[in-house]
Image: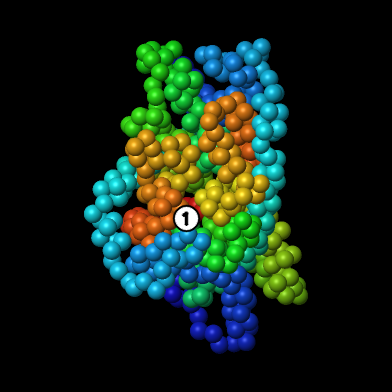
Amino acid sequence: MAAKVKVLKTKSERKNHTMAVTFALPAAVFSLALIIYPLFTTIKLSFQDVKFIGSLTDDAKGFTVANYTKLFSNADFWNALGRSILFTFCALSISFLIGLGLAILLNKKFHFQKLVRTLILLAWPIPGVIVGLLFTWLFDGNYGIINTILKSLHIIDQNVKWISTGNTAMITVITATIWKSYPFFTLTLLAGLKGISEDYYEAASIDGANAWQKFTKITLPALQSVIVTSLLLNGLWIFRNYDLVYTITGGGPNQATETLPLLLYNQAFKYYNMGYASTIGMISLLVCSIFVILAMPSLKKQFY
Amino acid sequence: MNTFSHRRSRRAGMYALIILSVVILAFPLYWMVVTALTTRSALLDNISVLPSLGNMTLSNFTKILDAHPILTWFGNSVFVTAFSTIIAIIVSTMAAYSMSRFRYKSTNFLGFFLLVVRMLPETLLVVPLYMMFTNMRLINNYASLIISNITFIIPFSTWMMKGYFDSIPTTLEEAARIDGCSRIQAVRKVIVPLATPGIAATATYSAILGWSEFLFARTFITQPDKWTITVGISSLMGEYTIIWGEVMAAAAISIIPIALVFIFLEKYMVAGVTAGAVKG
């Protein structure tokens, strides 16, 4: 990469450089104005004890670490952080396994392949809010079809109040999130699988490899960077998810499903503690950065 | 002979697995449609998975359209999504071309920067953006929503497009330029037509992101008649009694455009992801 960065000498190279910068400029301007500037505002706010109702209550107030000390001594915050990590881990690992299994299945040849692929991926474009609504109805405590099905299979005897009790509310939210996020894995892993040459598998068959050996020795290594990247992107999506959890439970019952994004939003737009909310935002950013740094080698390989 | 029957039973097993997956995974959407078409009394009376035709009705649709400005919200969403998608596609196609064809420090840095931006949580930025738009008096103005949508679509769409441009050989442009085209003409007449499937895939993806957007719309738009469809429909949940048949009818209406776009452009999506997001 470094070798390709040239010193500008000739007129045509200068012209190229001008064109490159001109083409890239609008994207850079949008990102700078709407991401970098607000990001710095967030950092600043996180060190200020401010409220915002129409305008900042007290802009002149000095910088303080009060928000951070308050946050770290607050049990709600640690609970929300733990919940977020549990929620992300469960939803991510299960949707990955489902997505990988489906990608392998869809990579085989069978009748009605296109129809099956469409039906399997159709959950992907559905907005999070609608997925939330749909699962609220499926898991409804009185008339939900999930209770009806489980009762007819004799798994449960009477209706379960999925959304209004703590643990089952978390299960409902995780199930909905899995349904929304597995298609992304299927889509990216399927694309990765299509890039693996048949020759490897044929050679392995001649050498007497069984299906499991082919999977672990050929498929998984070939997909490695796709797997890491898709895990990262989907993991971040789940970790920062707001709309789906908000629609199903709103963080309840009794904060049982209050993840970091919900805690942040409530602090900001229910109690107008903008400074405190920004501090929660900074911690979320820190967690996201850790994921990104861990995945960096694989990202570089894939994107450059 | 033995291997033949073995192969046949494996094939049967594969089909069984496919059918099982489709039945389970498509069930929620199937249930949305069934609920939207079922009368209220039937829904409250232990409905079975296979509904009887006698309980079918279209009244859920007519009632919800009468009671709430669903079509207005729908129109608002079309407007916001279309605007955001078109601008985001133009901006990101340009940036992606620049990143794919020129390897300067500035373009490399932009690429890396957009990759990082893609990882930022929306909830982190919604607070400062809300304050910024309040100061600019852009609350309840679609400009705020469109601008923030574009900003969040650009990182995704740029990287997707870049992968696509990378897959088009540079020799094609060089040939066009030898034939007397300027660089801009070469891009317009050779590269853009070749990249059309990639642009279609990226536009689909952008439209999905725009249509699904909830957090910004909920925060920046507070007047009910200006809500987008996601905010409008989520407000139906806050009512005293939720009439699920009607809510599911509204939900079904809201996913029609995005489902259609996805079904028609899905083949480009799969191809676009192959070329774009995923390099083997």
Neighbours of disc 1 within 10 Å: few (<14), some (14-19), many (20+): many
Q: Is residue A255 above or below residue B219?
A: above
Residue A40 drawn at (x, y percent):
42, 69
What residue appears at the point 64 percent right and 14 percent down from the top-left corner? B55
Residue B73 drawn at (x, y percent):
66, 44
Q: Is residue A22 above or below residue A47?
A: below
| Element carrying mark 1 | helix
B164 or A212: nearer the eye?
B164
Type of amino acid under label 1: Glu
Q: Is residue A116 above or below residue B126?
A: above
Q: Is residue B239 above or below residue B6?
A: below
Q: How many marks?
A: 1
Residue A76 drawn at (x, y percent):
29, 47
The residue indicated by pointer 1 is: B122
Based on the displayed image, in which of its 4 quarters is residue A67 positioned?
A: bottom left
Residue A276 drawn at (x, y percent):
36, 59
What residue appears at the point 46 percent right and 42 percent down from the top-left corner? A246
- The answer for which chain carries disc 1 is B
